[in-house]
Image (cartoon, rainbow, N blue to C red):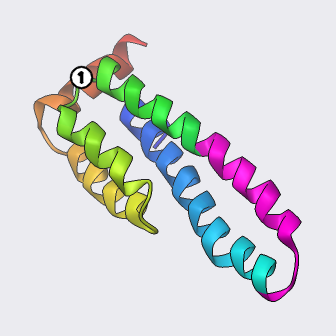
Amino acid sequence: MLKSKLGKFRFLGYLEGGSLLFLLFIAMPLKYWAGMPEVVTVVGALHGALFTVYCLGILYMTIAVRWPFIYSVLSFIVAFIPFGNFVLDRQLKKLEASDSPIAQKNVANTVSN
């Protein structure tokens, strides 16, 4: 997964998506049901940092791999939907395995790096 630029972006999507799920399904219940607001403070800051890095990753993929603008828009939108990054990852995995020009550019970028 970490051998290509697209694979690295997919991994970043897993991290960002996982942090959103942790924030929503663990930190928020702890804040409201267990009276531990500091958990949301820490996890929220971590998620915010990962989201920022994810957005920079989208920008990098748009420039480096030159994937269509719609991929960038969809990647940004799914970051706000729980489990969205995991659904997108499935599509990106198919793209990476296909013979599409974007996948071929990604492979060429991997070989040249």
| Other-residue count near label 1 (Cα within 10 Å), few / some / many at <14 / 14–19 / ≥20 | some
Residue at the spot 65% in from the left edge and 68% down from the top edge: 22
Q: Is residue 37 magenta?
A: yes
User: What segment is highlighted magenta in the picture?
Assistant: 33-50
Q: Position of residue 76 (x, y in %)?
A: 37, 45
Q: In the image, is residue 24 above or below residue 60?
A: below
Residue with the mark numbered 1: 66
Question: Quarter of the image holding residue 68?
Answer: top left
Chief SS of the magenta region: helix
Task: Answer left or right for 34 relative to 25.
Answer: right
> Residue drawn at (12%, 29%), measured in percent from left and top?
101
Element type at marker 1? loop
Instruction: Give the residue at the far bottom of this rendering.
Output: 33
Determine if the magenta segment contains residue 98. Answer: no
What is the residue that sits farthest to the left in this orientation? 100
User: Can I make out residue 4 in this image?
Assistant: no
Left or right relative to 54: residue 67: left
The residue at the point 19 percent across, 40 percent down is: 70
Amino acid, disc 1: Arg
Q: Give the image quarter of residue 64.
A: top left
Q: Give how far across and how far down residue 96 sits, in percent.
A: 26, 42
> In the rendered picture of this protein, how many numbered marks are placed on residues?
1
Q: As rendered, which of 95 and 13 lies closer to the eye?
A: 13
Relative side of 93 to 11, left or right? left
Is the residue 81 above or below the residue 13 in the image?
below
Q: Is residue 83 above or below residue 26?
A: above
Residue 48 locus on image (x, y percent): 64, 46
* Residue 5 placement (x, y as % from top left): 41, 29
Write the residue at 66% across / 66% down: 23
Q: Quadrant of the C terminus?
A: top left
| Residue 103 at least partly seen | yes
Q: Name the quadrant of the N terminus.
A: top left
